Image (cartoon, grey):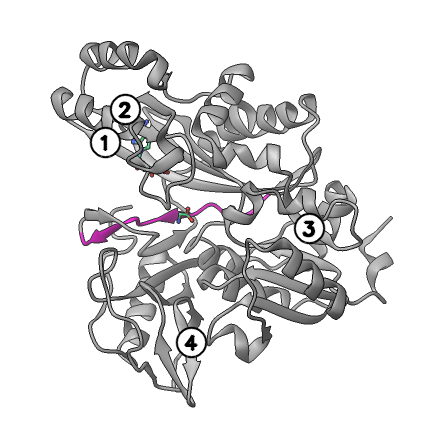
Amino acid sequence: MSAHRYDSIMYKVLILGGGGREHALAWKIGQSRLCQQIFVAPGNAGTDIIAENLDLNLMDFDQIKETVDRLEIDYLIVGPEAPLVAGIQDYFSDHQVKVIGPSKVAAQLEGSKAFAKQFMRSFNIPTAGYIEVTKDNLAEGLAHIAEVKGQIVLKADGLAAGKGVIILESKKKAKKVLKEMIDGKFGAASSTVVIEDFLDGVEFSVFVLTDGKNYRLLPIAKDYKRIGEGNKGLNTGGMGAISPVGFVDDKMMHQVIEDIIEPTIEGLQILEYDYKGIIFLGLIAVKGKPYVIEYNCRLGDPETEVILPRLDSDLMALFVAMHDGTLDQQDVRFTKNAAATVMLVSGGYPEAYEKGKTIRLDPKINDAIIFHAGTKRTAGEVVTNGGRVIAVTSLAKSHKKAVKKSLANINKIHFDQMYYRKDIGQDV
Ligand code: AMP
Ligand code: GLY
């Protein structure tokens, strides 16, 4: 069976989400010879140029089904984690639409830190040591903190909008925060807390496509989570990203594959989990050895904005093969050129910020790709509609040169209180 089999087939695709990741997905899938039409829900002012935006609630599966039926959608590509963790794949398991994303139980790898830790422990996958704490063994948790040497990592078990990981120096503060978390600081998401050993190293992200038994790697990336230059200040969804990542050499990747990716896929098979989707590994290299910081069950944002522009293969063909269980027959090819993306954000983000600022975008963008994130079209103009507004991606011989190109193009984009980091990729 070769890729030719699909030559005459064209699919209708619905992408769920409305960020830079989903604009990049729509942009890449739009280049596929297998794609007939793309819808994005809710989308943004960028996706509405290359696809049709739909106003859907991503957690209302009945509403999504009605739309899938009416528009005869063939593939549902799920951008963010929340619908996956809530079971959108299971909801459509008897439906003709093909969902790219894992089943509800497998999505617990992202949806529950305790579940992910137990999975890694069962399959001997390197990760930080930990204990699990609930109100029933709070005393054990407090005693554990008293014993920890160095920083203390507290993680809310469930999804907490990226805020559920708290790293503290002071044992006294850590005990207080642990109690607050158990008492509902993050609602039900923190009724279980994972206390983890602190790992000191450099982080990077590996994205794996899988059909549940075969896998293929996408380009490696690194994102910049902190709001401030020099990696200072509050955590954000991501202020920029680069791909590839220089310090991740063949030896490191060999360990990632052997010690982490293969045992993960094997674990999913042993547990008979349905996983036709993306495994996003948040990794940290400590003294030359990779450890898993977290699993995610989707693509990263803004990592997608650097990975997909480097991908030479047909992404839709890869998704089709992931669903059909034929990923072993696909090659993933990508350009040697490096990519960098710089995120333009609203002033005040990641805390309070205003929306509705007019965006002026000079059409003479030179050799960069503009991925919209929090934008929308109103009365003929494009306005800001979120904290992360636009990702500016460039390709060049090195990621430093790519960042330069993005920065030169950012001079052609304006909105009131626009902020961005000029130092993406400068530390590696
Ligand atoms: P997560 O939400 O699991 O990605 O965690 C957010 C961030 O916290 C990660 O990107 C790391 O920078 C940091 N982090 C999480 N776990 C650890 C750990 N065990 N040791 C050191 N840093 C960590
Ligand atoms: N950039 C990190 C994430 O998408 O979770």
Residues at circles 2 and 1 in contact by the CB criterion of under 8 Å: yes
Q: CA distance from mark 2 to mark 3?
A: 36 Å
The amino acid sitting under disc 4 is: Lys
User: Is the distance from the Cβ of mark 4 to the nearest ligand 2 atom less than 8 Å?
Assistant: no
Task: Depth check: give the residue in front, 150 or 74.
Answer: 74
Tell me which label, 1 or 4, sits earlier in the chain. 1
The amino acid sitting under disc 1 is: Ile
Q: Quadrant of residue 381?
A: bottom left
Q: Nearer the viewer, mark 2 or mark 4?
A: 4
Task: Depth check: give the residue in front, 422 or 347.
Answer: 347
The amino acid sitting under disc 2 is: Phe
Question: Residue 167 got which mark?
Answer: 1
Tell me which label, 2 or 4, sits earlier in the chain. 2
* Residue that mark 3 sits on: 99
Asked if residue 375 is positioned above or below residue 306 in the image, the reply reads below
User: Is the distance from the Cβ of mark 1 to the nearest ligand 1 atom less than 8 Å?
Assistant: yes
Q: CA distance from mark 1 to mark 3?
A: 36 Å
Q: Residue furthest bottom?
A: 380
Q: Residue 411 location in percent, x, y?
A: 26, 78
Task: Depth check: give the residue in front, 361 or 40.
Answer: 40
User: Is the distance from the Cβ of mark 3 to the nearest ligand 2 atom less than 8 Å?
Assistant: no
Residue at image coords 57%, 57%: 311
Q: Nearer the viewer, mark 2 or mark 1?
A: 1
Question: Residue 198 got which mark?
Answer: 2
Tell me which label, 1 or 3, sits earlier in the chain. 3
Q: Residue 33 location in percent, x, y?
A: 73, 68
Magenta stretch: give its range.
217-229
Q: Quadrant of residue 195?
A: top left
Disc 3 element: strand
* Residue that mark 4 sits on: 376
Q: Residue 356 location in percent, x, y?
A: 31, 77
User: Is the distance from the Cβ of mark 2 to the nearest ligand 1 atom less than 8 Å?
Assistant: yes
